[in-house]
Image (spheres, grey):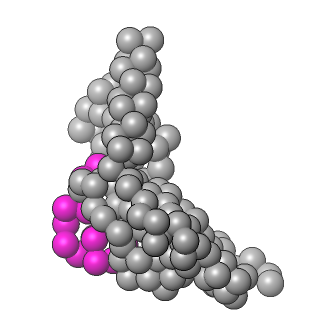
Amino acid sequence: MSSAGVIAAVAAQQQMSAEEEEMSNYSPEDLENDWEFKIVRANTGVFGNPQTLSQLLEEEARVGWIMVEKFDNSRIRFKRPRGARQKDSELPAGVDPYRVHYGMSSMAFALLIAAIALFGAFAVQAIIMVTATLVILIPMALLMIPR
């Protein structure tokens, strides 16, 4: 990525952070009732898909998070009672109650974009095949780890 691209990406991130600060109004009730908050972000507008949104809401509800608002199709704010932390140690392995990213990691997404730019359709097919393979193999490998 060129230095101009890096500068533009940093500026876009700063703008999103400032926007989230302005949009995140916490009521006195929120602050008095000892809530904790988080924003779950995706690299793309996946939360515009009702099935994906429903899946995210179900996953977050399992660890006590309640949707507060949907900023857009890539950012959703949640809250949960701070006391819900006491049950976090009982969660299954791999469940992160404080995850703030949904879907492909930012690094993987950046690599995908770079691959598209550099290698075109051939690279996309290869990345999809590798990703699909990893999605299958990583959970299988995790199941084989002795506990």
Q: Is residue 140 above or below residue 39?
A: below
Question: Toward which corner of the image does residue 88 lie, by quadrant?
Answer: bottom right
- Which residue is found at the position 28% from the left and 55% from the top? 71
Q: Position of residue 130 (x, y in %)?
A: 44, 53
Instruction: Tell me residue 89's x, y (percent).
Output: 72, 82
Vertical comparison of 82 with 135: above or below = below
57 above or below 40?
Answer: below
The location of residue 3, given as percent across then percent down, is: 44, 11
Q: Is residue 95 visible?
A: no
Q: Main secondary structure of the magenta part?
A: helix
What span is in magenta? Answer: 43-56
Q: Residue at x 28, y 62 (%)?
A: 70
Farthest-out residue, right: 147
User: Is residue 52 toward the left or the right of residue 16 in the image?
Assistant: left
Foreground residue, 115 or 125? 115
Report if residue 145 is visible in the image. yes
Q: Residue at x 19, y 62 (%)?
A: 48
Residue at 36% of width from left, 72% of height from top?
67
